[in-house]
Image: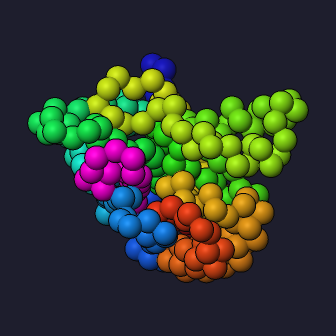
């Protein structure tokens, strides 16, 4: 009779490290400044979107809306859009990229419904929106309008999402020599939006379909366009120092720097910061 071979123990696959929770103010924080405007028309929120089996705050959703001041109820529009986006994201179970897109469409539809119920308004309610879903390993985003999403990594700042204002078109004309640098910087249509949430079909949407990989030391900033008072060089110098401090101190420093510039037509500013450790 053939002898039975002694079975060898099966090695278990190495376990992945558990996701690390973010700590409020230390790892994520947000600040606002009204600027020279009569009203604050930005709205923002952080939401905990951790998986059921993970600890709370292992995955964050940051959403920033910048209400359109030339339209009716800009502050209401940003509030409604941000709230609707977060609710819709929680309510559906699709893949992350599709959840982000469905949530964006829900936010846009909400504004359309509210505008239809207030026919006396001269212009429909509108807002920009940028949403970032962040863990310690990956980032997803979706945006409409000109509100920027920045990544600071190894001393350099990078804008991750598209700018849906006319600014990129005007800057391209400057590069081609069709406008001088001064003409481009002061162009009256520089901040005109090509796309925004207005309750109409969306014409331009910037989004990720695959996760963007993050690394230790990265700083994510989601903001309204009022932050663009600061140049990339100014933000890089500030954030290089910020690598050794907390998210709340970084957000405070950005607002302080904008206040020091004291721009004559300073727009509302909202700054949301997430540090990857």
227 or 60: nearer the eye? 227
200 or 27: nearer the eye? 200
Does 147 lie within the magenta span? no
Look at the image and tell me whether residue 268 can be seen. Answer: yes
At 26% from the left edge and 39% from the top edge, which residue is drawn?
Answer: 122
Residue 207 spot, x, y in % from top left: 50, 34
Residue 259 spot, x, y in % from top left: 58, 77
Total label count? Answer: 0
**Can you say which quadrant of the picture contains the C terminus?**
bottom right
At 29% from the left edge and 31% from the top edge, which residue is drawn?
Answer: 199
Residue 76 spot, x, y in % from top left: 25, 53
Q: Which residues are magenta?
A: 57-76
277 or 71: nearer the eye? 71
At 70% from the left edge and 49% from the top edge, which residue is drawn?
Answer: 186
Horizontal side, residue 271 vs residue 150: left or right: left
At 47% from the left edge and 32% from the top edge, which residue is drawn?
Answer: 195
The colour scheme used here is: rainbow
Does 67 lie within the magenta span? yes
Residue extending farthest left? 117
**Can you say which quadrant of the picture contains the N terminus?**
top left
Residue extending farthest top? 1
Horizontal side, residue 151 vs residue 271: left or right: right
239 or 225: nearer the eye? 225
Horizontal side, residue 246 vs residue 23: left or right: right
Residue 166 spot, x, y in % from top left: 61, 35
Look at the image and tell me whether residue 85 can be seen. Answer: no
Residue extending farthest right? 177
């Amino acid at each position: 009779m053939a002898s039975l071979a002694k079975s060898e123990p099966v090695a278990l696959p190495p376990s992945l490290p558990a996701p690390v929770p973010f700590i409020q103010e230390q790892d994520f924080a947000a600040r606002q400044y009204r600027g020279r405007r009569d009203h604050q028309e930005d709205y923002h929120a952080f939401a905990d979107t951790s998986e059921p089996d993970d600890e709370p705050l292992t995955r964050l959703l940051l959403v920033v809306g910048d209400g359109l001041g030339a339209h009716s109820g800009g502050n209401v529009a940003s509030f409604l859009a941000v709230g609707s986006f977060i609710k819709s994201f929680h309510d559906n179970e699709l893949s992350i990229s599709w959840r982000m897109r469905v949530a964006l469409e829900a936010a846009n539809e909400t504004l359309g419904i509210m505008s239809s119920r207030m026919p006396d308004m001269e212009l429909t309610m509108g807002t920009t929106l940028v949403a970032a879903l962040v863990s310690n390993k990956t980032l997803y985003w979706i945006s409409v309008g000109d509100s920027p999403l920045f990544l600071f990594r190894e001393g350099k700042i990078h804008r991750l999402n598209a700018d849906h204002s006319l600014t990129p078109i005007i800057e391209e004309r400057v590069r081609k020599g069709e406008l001088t640098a001064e003409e481009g910087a002061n162009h009256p249509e520089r901040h005109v939006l090509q796309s925004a949430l207005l309750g109409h079909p969306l014409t331009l949407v910037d989004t990720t379909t695959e996760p963007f990989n993050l690394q230790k030391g990265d700083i994510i900033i989601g903001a309204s366009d009022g932050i663009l008072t600061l140049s990339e060089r100014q933000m890089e110098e500030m954030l290089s120092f910020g690598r050794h401090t907390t998210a709340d101190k970084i957000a405070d420093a950005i607002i302080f720097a904008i206040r020091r510039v004291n721009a004559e037509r300073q727009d509302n500013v909202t700054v949301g910061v997430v540090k990857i450790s």
